[in-house]
Amino acid sequence: MNPVTYVVPALLYLVVAIAMAILARSIGVTTLADGVVLGLLNGLGFALPMLGIEATFDPNKPKPLVWFVITTAYHLIGFVIFAEVIAIWH
């Protein structure tokens, strides 16, 4: 498999982590519970709507609802993990 397949998502998730760290610091996220809330709000507020729009308008997905559920869950879990690590790291 092409290394770009792994490098580009890693770099983009680094951008997400940096943006989330800046947001966490600005709103005072300091506990695991705060991290969970931050991760859920980011996942449900940003990832879910954008992936829903993509699933709706991309005609190349054979099962858009299945793709949407799996991809949204993946990103939601990732956002929560990022936010928890950021919350306990400060």
Image (cartoon, rainbow, N blue to C red):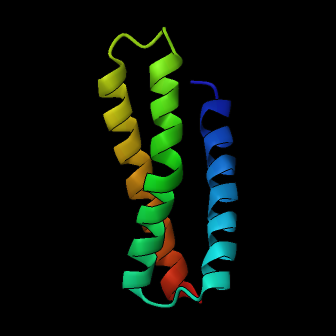
Query: Which residue sits at x=40%, y=42%?
Result: 72
Q: Position of residue 16 (x, y in %)?
A: 64, 57
Q: Quadrant of the C terminus?
A: bottom right
Please state the total of marks drawn on the protein image. Answer: 0
Query: Which residue sits at x=62%, y=48%?
Result: 10
Q: Nearer the viewer, residue 21 or 58?
A: 58
Q: Quick check: can you spot residue 58?
A: yes
Quadrant assignment, res 37: bottom left
Q: Is residue 37 left or right of residue 26?
A: left
Q: Position of residue 49 (x, y in %)?
A: 49, 41
Quadrant assignment, res 77: bottom left
Q: Position of residue 18 (x, y in %)?
A: 69, 66
Q: Position of residue 75 (x, y in %)?
A: 44, 48
Query: Which residue sits at x=66%, y=41%?
Result: 7
Say if 21 sits above or below 67 in the image: below
Q: Quadrant of the N terminus?
A: top right
Q: Quick check: can you spot residue 3?
A: no
Q: Nearer the viewer, residue 16 or 57?
A: 57
Quadrant assignment, res 20: bottom right
Q: Is residue 85 left or right of residue 11?
A: left
Say if 3 sits above or below 64 in the image: below
Query: Which residue sits at x=48%, y=9%?
Result: 60
Say if 44 sits above or below 81 in the image: above
Q: Nearer the viewer, residue 76 or 85?
A: 76
